[in-house]
Amino acid sequence: MDYSWDDKPQYAVSDESNEPMMALKEKYVTEYSYVDNEFTEHYLEHKALWLNSNDKIEDYNRIYLPYSSNSVLLKSKARVITKSGKVIDLDESKILTAQDEETGKNYKYFAFEGLEKGSIVEYFYVEKKKPSYSGTMFRLQSDFPKKKVAFDL
């Protein structure tokens, strides 16, 4: 799955919005195919989240990525778009790996810097994994407003 984002993001947010947070973009793509005679799933998640409160900045200054022995993270990118429009790309050194002390499981996450009230956190990742044969539940509703939501299968 070949995917990238716009080099110059064009997200519009009303200055009058009192919302603490808004999803400006949510895109999910699930693609099934045979690769080297093996049935595989490629999963894409792309989000742009406008953060308009200190609580939401605290909640979203780290975004956790899928990480398991059954999947491979093929591509991931993240950036912060400040209220003034400055784009701060996260380099590979900002994708951190940690270990859960209780379970011993490893996980990866983006560590965002430069967040301020009115900033946008944007990220995407592409994961290759073994498909689930018993189905997958997808919940698109949330407790915050969303502007543009897409799901492709």
Image (cartoon, rainbow, N blue to C red):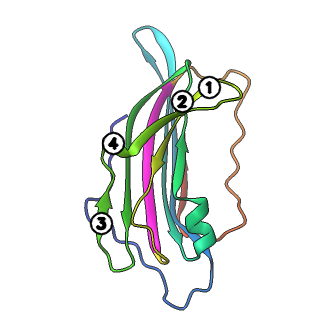
Instruction: Name the quadrant of the C terminus.
Output: top right
Q: Is residue 86 above or below residue 70?
A: below
**Residue 68 image-quadrant placement:** top right
Taking the spot 47% from the left edge, 32% from the top edge, the residue there is 127
**Left or right placement of residue 100 versus residue 84 in this view:** right
Identify which amino acid the numbered label 4 is placed on: Ser
For residue 96, what is the image quadrant? Answer: top left
Residue flagged by tag 1: what amino acid is it? Lys
Instruction: Please give the name of the residue rendered at 55% of the width and 77% of the height, measured from the top-left corner.
Output: 52
Q: Which residue, given by chain and number where applicable, does mark 3 sit on? A: 87
Mark 1 or mark 4, which has the lower sequence index?
4
Verify CB contact (< 8 Å) between mark 2 and mark 1: yes
Give the label on residue 20, or none: none
Give the overall secondary structure of the magenta segment: strand
Task: Identify residue for label 2.
Answer: 67
Up the image or down, 21 lies above or below 107; here it is below
Q: Nearer the viewer, mark 3 or mark 4?
A: 4
Q: Does label 1 or label 3 sit earlier along the sequence?
A: 3
Q: Earlier in the sequence, mark 3 or mark 4?
A: 3
Range shown magenta: 119-128
Residue that appears at 64% across and 23% down: 104
**Residue 146 visible in the picture:** no
Label 1 and label 4: CA atoms lie apart by 20 Å
